[in-house]
């Protein structure tokens, strides 16, 4: 049966999937947040989550345990996947919604004790985290269907890069539509943060469906950034082989997409755009 609870930031619903015996969809105020299969944590229903998994698979040797930070927990889909795919990984999940975290712990408990859940503000928790302590930082924080302004600025990305080890990878889920005003500003913001970090500009790419990139619909894009060169060819092969193929935009093509967009700082940052009525985005 569905489970409906009032949580700190809205109304959460856990909806069972009739096609998979122990699988659940989590929504908050009707916006999809997470999909979890308790019997098969390797099953990643949402396309953008699979792209995040592809980025991890391409960037790190297979099976290697990672130290991961997940900003935004939801039903902990990625933490469950990483624990199953890379046993021994040490993971920190930061979820600001205390009652949502309690609901997930009650109905969809995490089987892996190496996953630690912190009920805290993501920006505040990150500021207190140790320097060079993580291989992976995933930013997937949404209040309903919008990413908070505080997690879209150069200052925020610089904090994430500080927490990463030199060869670590930063991943962010961004939702937008043509003319991509928000997405372009986020690309410029990541470039500025990498340059400030002294990483010779680092490396950056974007993963998204062709339909989103062509401006046909509102949708999710995954941004991938690192101080080291990214494995773009390997990542392109993984994304192309998906049931819903995605493009990897990198190099000159990414520069053209970014255009003349300016990075945003804490003073100018805004929340991500609200999806249009009927649009299906996840976050």
Image (cartoon, rainbow, N blue to C red):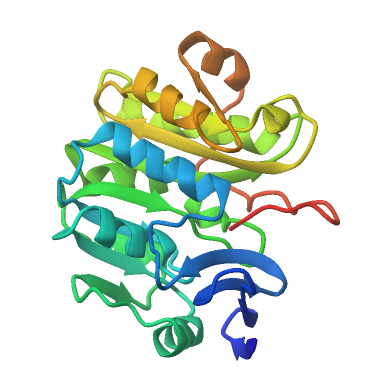
- The answer to whether residue 234 is seen in the rendering is yes
Asked whether, in this view, residue 78 is left or right of residue 162, the answer is: right
Quadrant of the rendered structure where residue 167 is? top left
136 or 148, which is in the foreground? 136
Residue 64: percent from left, percent from top: 15, 45
Determine the residue positioned at 13% across, 60% down.
88
Residue 81: percent from left, percent from top: 35, 58
From the image, which quarter does the C terminus lie in? bottom right
Asked whether, in this view, residue 62 is left or right of residue 53, the answer is: left
Determine the residue positioned at 48% across, 53% down.
151
160 or 24, which is in the foreground? 24
Asked whether, in this view, residue 275 is left or right of residue 27, the answer is: right
Residue 255: percent from left, percent from top: 53, 15
- Location of residue 167 with respect to 90 vertically, above or below: above
- The answer to whether residue 159 is seen in the rendering is no
Determine the residue positioned at 52% across, 35% down.
242
Outermost residue on the right side: it is: 277
Asked whether, in this view, residue 282 is left or right of residue 65, the answer is: right
- Location of residue 7 with respect to 136 vertically, above or below: below
């Amino acid at each position: 049966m569905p489970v409906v609870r009032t949580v700190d930031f809205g109304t959460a619903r856990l909806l069972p999937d009739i096609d998979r015996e122990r699988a659940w969809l989590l929504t908050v105020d009707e916006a999809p947040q997470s999909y979890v299969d308790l019997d098969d944590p390797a099953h990643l229903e949402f396309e953008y989550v699979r792209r995040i998994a592809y980025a991890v698979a391409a960037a790190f040797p297979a099976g290697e345990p990672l130290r991961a930070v997940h900003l935004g927990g939801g039903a902990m889909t990625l933490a469950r996947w990483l624990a199953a795919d890379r046993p021994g990984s040490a993971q920190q999940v930061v979820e600001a919604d205390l009652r949502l975290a309690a609901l997930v712990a009650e109905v969809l408990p995490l089987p892996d004790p190496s996953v630690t859940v912190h009920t805290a503000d993501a920006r505040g928790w990150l500021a207190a985290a140790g320097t060079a302590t993580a291989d992976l930082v995933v930013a997937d924080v949404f209040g309903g269907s919008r990413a908070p302004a505080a997690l879209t600025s150069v200052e925020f990305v610089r904090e994430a890069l500080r927490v990463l080890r030199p060869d670590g990878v930063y991943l962010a889920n961004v939702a937008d539509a043509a003319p991509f005003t928000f997405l372009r500003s986020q690309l410029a913001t990541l470039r500025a943060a990498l340059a400030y970090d002294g990483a010779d500009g680092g490396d950056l790419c974007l993963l998204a469906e062709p339909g989103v990139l062509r401006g046909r619909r509102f949708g999710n894009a995954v941004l991938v950034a690192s101080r080291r060169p990214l494995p773009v060819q390997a990542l392109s092969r993984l994304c192309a082989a998906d049931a819903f193929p995605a493009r990897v935009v990198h190099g000159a093509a990414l520069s053209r997409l970014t255009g003349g967009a300016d990075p945003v700082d804490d003073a100018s940052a805004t929340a991500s755009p609200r999806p249009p009525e009927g649009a299906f985005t996840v976050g």
